[in-house]
Each structure stands twice: as C-alpha cells, then as structure tokens.
Amino acid sequence: MDIQSKIAIVTGASRGLGAAVSTALVEEKAGCVYGLARDAVALSALHKKLGRNFVPVTLDITLHAEVKAWAGKTFSGNALPDILINNAGAGSFARIDEMPTDEWHAMVNTNLNGTYHITSEVVKLMRKKKSCSHIINIGSILGITTRSEGAAYCATKYAINGFSDALFKELRGDHIKVTCVNPGSIATDFFKSSGIAPHQNMLQPGDVADMLIHVLQTPDNFLINEMTVRPLNPQVPHTTKQE
C-alpha cells in the first residue's frame, strides 16, 4: 500500500505507541489520521505537533453506540478508511484473587470489546472499497505466552490473537488485510502497575511504529497475518556510578 493520501484510524493515539504510529503515518503523508483516545488534552497536544493531517477524536471505544455514531457521521462517499490500527489497550497485573473486578472488566472492555466495536464499524466501510485496506491489531507477547499475575491481561491478548486469525480468513476475499503484531515490552508506562519501569533496552515506540509502516507498505497481494517482535536484550541496562 502506498500510504500517501490514505485515511487512517489509530486507537489509543494519545500517547505511547499510538502517538508514535500516528506520527509515522503523518510523516508518510497519509491524507488524514484520525487519532482516537479518551484523553482530550493529550490528543490536542499531539494535534499541535502534527498539524492538520492529524484529527483528534475524543472517544471511548468501549461505548459501541458512540463509536457507531462517530463512524456514521465521519465517513461517506469515497472518503472511507484505508487503515485501522487497533492499539488501545488496558493492562493491570495482580494475583487473580487480588485482581479488582473493575480492573478485569476494564481490560475486557477495552482490549476485546473496544476492538470489536471499532473493527465491526470500520469493516462495513472498508468492504465498500475496491482498493486494498489493512487492519493491524496490536496484541502482545503475552498473547502467545504467559506470566505470573497476568492471567487477566493474557486472556484478553490471547483473545485478540484468535480474533485476528479468524478475521484475516474472513476478510481476505474483500481485499482487507488483517495483521496481528505481538510486541514484547515497549518503553512506555504501560506496565507501571506491575512495578516495571520503561528503560532503553525495551522496544522503542518509534521503532515499532516504523515496523508497522513497513507492514502497511507491503504489496497488496502480500499478507503478513502475524508477527512477534521483542527486544534482543530485554534486561535493564547496568549503570556505572561516577566516582
């Protein structure tokens, strides 16, 4: 796909990987990048940085009626989305007997239900197009393996892998690519609740965003349906004290 002039949607766009992907798409001269998130202030700051090709959309994807209303009023005629990056995610880590019920539901509602809400509406629009479209679902290394105190989060990301695998088989005949990317640790505050601070040996958001751009730019009849990426050396860098 030639990204230039294409219409893209990025969920969880206000910070971290979502902001990095939005930035990369604008730099590749996408015609319009709709950045969806709940944090209006952060979206506004990103809009000031990226300019008019980035359109901030304050939206909670866990609310299907609001997602449907936004898609219906935003897209019509030939102005249909070409790219959907399902990046929004919530993560909490604790022993299963200590996991607050509201945090469990927040992960299920954002990571799984939210992905369904936006994807189901965007696919209706992509199917109207004759040209190739592309959906990228951001999974996790914890969607193909597990860790202690991560049962809730792992369950949602295993679900995203299953969702993506079934979806690529369903949509390939409609010229819609579906790719599930499972990254290891990315240098954001995502794992803050489990006491893991970002460091330079983690994957860098800009590097992951560049990789996603390469996936989008593959030839139309070339499908990467699943990818796993991780740091070569995930260990916290050693620091040397100055004498």
Image (cartoon, rainbow, N blue to C red):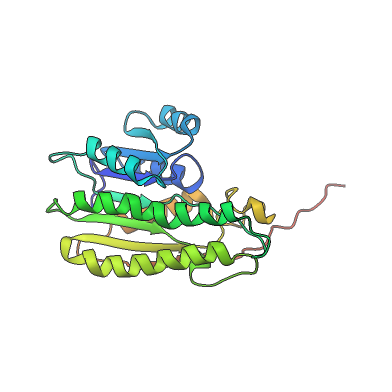
Residue occupying the point 40% across, 55% down = 113
Residue 219 in view in this figure: no
The answer to which image quadrant residue 214 occupies is bottom left
Where in the figure is residue 199, as x and y percent of width and height? 64, 52
Where in the figure is residue 156, as x and y percent of width and height? 48, 63
Q: Is residue 184 above or below residue 207?
A: below
Q: Is residue 201 left or right of residue 84?
A: right
Q: How many marks?
A: 0
Residue occupying the point 41% across, 63% down = 160
Residue occupying the point 34% across, 40% down = 66
Residue 3 in view in this figure: yes
Outermost residue to the front:
101
The quadrant of the picture occupied by the N terminus is: bottom left
Outermost residue to the bottom:
145
Q: Is residue 4 left or right of residue 118?
A: left
**22 or 108, which lies in front?**
108
The answer to which image quadrant residue 37 occupies is top left
Residue occupying the point 23% across, 50% down = 2
**83 or 193, which lies in front?**
193
